[in-house]
Image (cartoon, grey):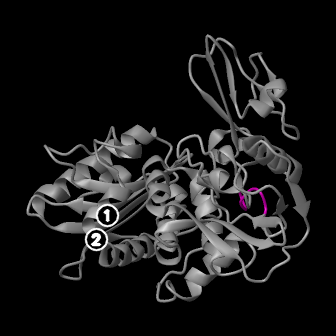
Amino acid sequence: MKLKTFRNHFTGIMIYDPMSGDTLYRLNSDKYFTPASNTKIFTLYTSLLLLPKQIPALKYCNVNDTLFIEGTGNPSLLHPYLKDSSVARFLKGFKNISLHQNNFTDSKFGPGWAWEDYDGYYSAERSALPIYGNVVTIFNSDSLHVIPNYFMPNVALVKNTINRENETNTFYFDPTRKDTLEIPFKTDSTVIKTLLEKALGREISVVQKMPCEEKIILSGILTDSINKRMMQESDNFLAEQLLLLASSTLSDTLNTGTAIEYMLKNHLKDLKQLPRWVDGSGLSRYNLFSPEAIVYVLSAIHREVPKERLFHLFAEGGESGTISDWYPGNPQPYIYAKTGTLGNNHNISGYLITKSGKTLIFSFMNNHFTNPASEIKKQMQYVFEWIRDNY
């Protein structure tokens, strides 16, 4: 296999046959790369190991005539795509509700995130009790629609270079737009409390401490429904919240670092190149992973998860997710993978089905190129097709 077209940037690749245990090809596979959203493969592994079949949607306890609640990091409550109302339905059965919000000990943004992305849909704030995906959804269909409607007075119908003011929940929407705009809102205890009150149609109180040590966990939607959207659509917000959810199973406090540290010390301690892993989504350029480490995790998932379930979680070449326009099969998909893209970086890692019926595990990472990403993808597609046809 010749990779001359990849000489002008840093390329790493590893192709592994899990049946024979043989590495079929490697290049710079032990070197560190900026993984971008390939980081979500590690988040998926964390989710598969630490979270139950149904997500821990809420923690609560009853004291006298009051229901005390705290978030687990569950991202699904009234989420614009997941559309889960199970927590809201549960809470509507109680007259007196007190909300505890001090169990979130992380920052709203991950380390190394680009500060100017604050108003981009892909950079929603992390929180203990997200609601509506922590974004405002705005579209114009005969009339202006703002979800949640609470923010309607805060929307200015003007064209602007930004979608939201940096420090306030003041939003801008061009009324001539034909598409839907999703803008992260600034989260704080008052905003979350107010949005929850409006969703429930009743007032709730805020407490500084949960009055009970033993808390009951309310089960929510299937964890794989979140895993799937995270992996196929490369949803950053869901990835971040999945690590917080994982931390909720390890501690009473929600912190991304808790989940990462646990995984590195327990399930990833045998990695030859321990990653620098700082967030769930890969938005941070501080993350550093090797192709070999990614193949290690993909292999572990492959051993532990049945193929029908596993491939259902990943984007399919030519069919779905971030690779719906790339790596098409003939006639069936042959690539099931996760992409990772930041400026001047594009990676893809996953599973490749050869014409002989073998399942190969690969990680193909490209950093620091100056050519258009589409050119890199064309050459990667050529490499994948060659592998498919020759193994």
Residue 88: percent from left, percent from top? 66, 51
Please give the name of the residue rendered at 64% of the width and 11% of the height, measured from the top-left corner.
176
Task: Write the start and end of the magenta stretch as one range.
Answer: 107-112
Q: Dividing the image into 4 quarters, which one contains the C terminus?
A: bottom left
From where the camera sits, is residue 279 visible? Answer: yes
Q: Check residue 309 in the rendering and tell me which mark sits there, or answer none.
A: 1
The image shows residue 361 at horizontal and vertical percentages of: 29, 68
Q: Which residue is denoted by mark 2 in the rendering?
A: 306
Residue at left offset 15%, top offset 67%: 358
Residue 371 image point, x, y percent: 46, 40
Query: Which of the 4 quarters of the picture holds residue 217?
Result: bottom right
* Up-down relation of residue 45 to residue 379 (above or below): below
Q: Quadrant of the N terminus?
A: bottom left
Residue at position x 37%, y 53% in the image: 6
Mark 2 to mark 1 CA distance (whole Å): 6 Å
Element type at mark 2: loop
Left or right of residue 209, residue 47 in this image: left
Query: Tag 1: Cα neighbours inside 10 Å, few (<14), some, or many (≥20)?
Result: few
Query: How many numbered marks appear?
Result: 2
The answer to the question of whether label 2 and label 1 lie on touching residues, with beta carbons closer than 8 A, is yes
Where is residue 374 drawn, in percent x and y? 40, 38
Residue 84 lies, with reference to residue 208, above or below; the image says above
From the viewer's side, name the closer residue of 333 and 169: 169
